[in-house]
Amino acid sequence: MILLLILLALAVRGFFNIYNHQPTADVKVEQPLIIKKAPPVKEVAEPTDPGLQQIALEVEKVAKASEEVAIETQKFIDEENAKKILINQALNKSSQVKGIYLNEFIANYQTPFAKSSRENIKRMLQETELNGVVIDIKENNGPDLPNSLKTFINELHQQDVWVIARICVFRDSSLREKKPEWYLKDSTATSSDNIWKDPAGASWLDASSTEAQAYIIDFAKKAIDFGFDELQFDYIRFPSDGKIKNIVYPFYNVKTEKYEVIGGFFSKLSQDLKEYKPSIILSADLFGYLATQFQSFDIGQRLFDAGQYLDYLSFMLYPSHFYGGFWVDYDGQRGLPALRLLYKDETTTSTDNLVSGNPYPVILRSVLSSLDYLSVYNLKAKVRPWLQDFNLSYDVNRGIIYDAEKVKAQIQGAEDAGSSGWLLWNSTNIYTEAALKKIGE
């Protein structure tokens, strides 16, 4: 029995030495396990002593079990290596996405206009530096995943295009009748319909509802199965506009900090979806001012939380949307001056000191600021900002037009700051092709 115990100990120690799996930041691929058969031994007469016979049987059993353990271990190593390779490929391919936004009408509908728009988008993806698209699959009116979209996704993948699904999270009016208990309520409502609405008439799920959170995660898994390379989440926050003081929260405990709720959901979302598909890339849309101010307690978003759990952060850096102005301090590391830009200035007709009139520095300083913050806290997320390719009538009336020059200036600002790609937004999906580099330039 002493020999048996020694053999058992060696087998157990050998198993643990074969593979000790430790997660690594650089996604290291393990070396394959080499299983060698023992050399042949000279035949010897079987022992006649019953005790020795029993030991021989146990030794044979241990050897067989050890070989089975080695085979299963090799299988596990192969599976883990395959996962790591896919993760590396996804991270590399997503690191320089230059994309455009497509609404659900253009992406899904079979009207002549929608079809011709898709063909034009595919042409631009072939002829310009564009290599990615962001497609609405869940807006305020709820999920939208028609089978026709699969065909379009396949066509885009054939062009080696990175395909991102945009998912609106807590701003969702689609379940007001089926799940009214999930929604924020209006304390001033006088009718039976007491669900709170923002100025655009949209309703909001209570971010603290575990059932509402599960609904979002379940839908996200469907989007993964649909064939998207990346999921981009918008409205992962509490409401920011409207009569906020009238809100009654059915689940949220007002004593809890809102960022704890949203940060907790970032964590759960990442954990559940990465377990479901380790190579899926996750990103989120954030207000532009978070790039320089880093947190907004009123809506529950902190750059620290988003940066911990997501792969990419897409700040909506539309210069025309900085209604409170734009300011950053002196950057001693790079020798960049303090910047103070106004949203409007009644004292002059010049646009030199207006946010909308300064696309390059607004984008440059925003991306630099956010990257510095992420670096200080060693957070994994990269920055891939949304840029403005549209005009607001307010700007047009004061002579600020986002033409090719201004779109190019934003792209240059993002790239000079070291962003991991960029995205262009236009709700009508009509983009300034003259601002984009042609293939081969």
Image (cartoon, rainbow, N blue to C red):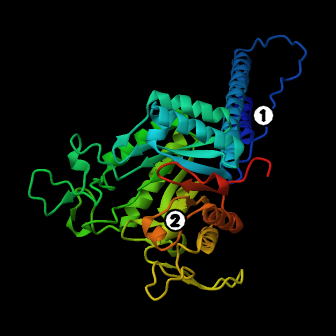
In the image, what residue type sits under mark 2? Tyr
Q: Earlier in the sequence, mark 1 or mark 2?
A: 1
SS for callout 1: loop
- For disc 2, the neighbor class at 10 Å (few under 14, some 14 to 19, many from 20) is many
Residue 417 in the image: state x and y as whole percent.
68, 68
The answer to whether residue 20 is visible is no
The circle on residue 33 is 1
Query: Does residue 404 appear anywhere in the picture?
Result: yes
Please determine whether, in this image, residue 38 is positioned above or below residue 227. Answer: above
Mark 1 vs mark 2, foreground winner is 2
**Vertical side of 407 occupied by 146: above or below:** above
Check residue 313 in the rendering and tell me which mark sits there, or answer none: none
Which amino acid, mark 1?
Leu
Q: In which quarter of the image is residue 352?
A: bottom right
Q: Where is residue 72 in the image (x, y as percent from the top left)?
A: 67, 28
From the image, tell me which residue sits under label 2. 318
Quarter of the image where one finds residue 257:
bottom left
Q: Which of 363 and 167 is in front in this view?
A: 363
Could you tell me which residue is drawn at 73 percent across and 20 percent down?
60
Q: Position of residue 202 (x, y in %)?
A: 29, 53
From the top left corner, tell me how far across and down residue 82 is, in percent: 69, 35
The residue nearer to you, when weighing 52 against 387, is: 387
